[in-house]
Image (spheres, rainbow, N blue to C red):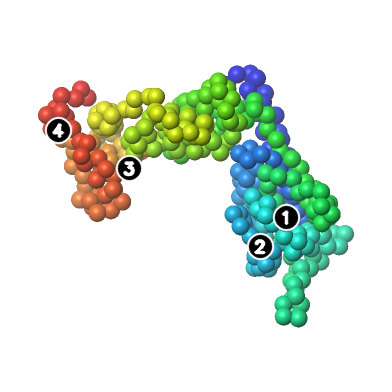
Amino acid sequence: MSPEQADDLEITKKRSKLIVDRVRSVALGYSTGFFLHGEGGSGKTYTVTNALHDLGSDWILHNSDMTGTGLYEALKERPSAVHVLDDLEQLYRDTKAVGILRAATWGDENGKNRIITKAVHKKNESFEFTGGIIILSNLPLGDLPHWKALATRLSPAIFQLTEGEKKAMMLDIASKGKFGMAPDVCEEVCEYIIFHVEKNGNCPLSLRMLDVCLQDRRMYDNGECETHWKDLVVSRLEGEITEPKIKPRKRKVRLQDERFIAQQVFDMFPDHRQKRFAEWEKRTGKTERSLYRRLEDLGLEKRPKFMSIDDDGKDEEAFESDNLSTPEEIDTLTV
């Protein structure tokens, strides 16, 4: 990471700490709500939910779809929890939902006595809400009067990252490794994304894009796709299905690589099964069953009896069975 990127990362971390403190204010009861908006893939949900988790707060995430009635029932079921409403922009158009949110985030001068009422068959039912509301959105609340009234209760704030800050955050995440992949592998994917975006300018950087591209690399390294991972990444970045440009590694070559690694970890830990598997998993991301298949290929060790062929490795075995090298080919390997 360059000095400039390190500076961008430091700025982003300081801004994230401000978000965490706004979340802490809601979770600890100093404020009743918080509205955070900004472009998708900037880390809003990640930052907020991690903060709530670290605090040990009672919280629940709502996303995808919710009506005013659904919101009422959710708050009634857990009236003391922090409710995180993520990407529920359609809720702003529901005047019933906005009314419930206004009642949930404003009471007396101490933020108490927040009574939410509902008319049911000519009768009123009500409950006191003592929790908090955090709304995460890609869009601002808007300028309609009932939205403005809600805004005064939630103190909206926008979180926008520069391209440099996004780049620094992505590199920082990759440097720690993710999804069981080694840091250097994650950094290679991250740097390829940044290179392609800067070269072609066809889409903005985002933390979300990093995650899905890392999964493309993981799928490729596991031998579960025929397209090279870089072509998969380009397809995501450009939003097109085009002719792949990179010749993928053949499965036969991958199996040879795995046997070479299996030989190495066997030599490192000949009498320690757990350490042997830990090293194998670290270097390949694959299961212990896969390790024993490669060891069997090499004639080093048979699979333990408790590893039934009918459990979770069955599909992987079927996938690879037609691609195993012959015994004569195995004998020619240099290990």
**SS of the residue at dot 4?**
loop
The number of numbered discs placed on residues in the rendered structure image is: 4
Q: Which mark is residue 326?
A: 4
Name the quadrant of the C terminus: top left
Q: First in sequence, mark 4 or 2: give its number.
A: 2
Q: Position of residue 259 (x, y in %)?
A: 24, 31
Residue that numbered label 1 is attached to: 92
For the residues carrying marks 3 and 1, which lies nearer the camera in this image? Answer: 1
Residue at 63% across, 37% down: 42
Q: To which quarter of the image does residue 109 belong?
A: bottom right
Q: To which quarter of the image does residue 267 belong?
A: top left
Front residue of this view, candidates 125 and 140: 140
Q: Residues within 10 Å of mark 2 (few under 14, many from 20)?
A: some
Q: Which mark is residue 287?
A: 3
Q: To which quarter of the image does residue 163 belong?
A: top right
**SS of the residue at dot 2?**
loop
Q: Report whether 98 appears left or right of 297.
A: right
- CA–CA distance between discs 3 and 2? 43 Å
Residue at 44% across, 34% down: 241
Q: Residues within 10 Å of mark 1 (few under 14, many from 20)?
A: some
Q: Position of residue 122 (x, y in %)?
A: 76, 81
Q: First in sequence, mark 1 or 4: give its number.
A: 1
For the residues carrying marks 1 and 4, which lies nearer the camera in this image? Answer: 1
Residue at 65% across, 46% down: 48
Q: First in sequence, mark 3 or 1: give its number.
A: 1
Residue type pointed to by label 4: Thr
Residue furthest out toward the right = 109
Q: Position of residue 149 (x, y in %)?
A: 84, 55
**SS of the residue at dot 1?**
helix
Residue that numbered label 2 is attached to: 67
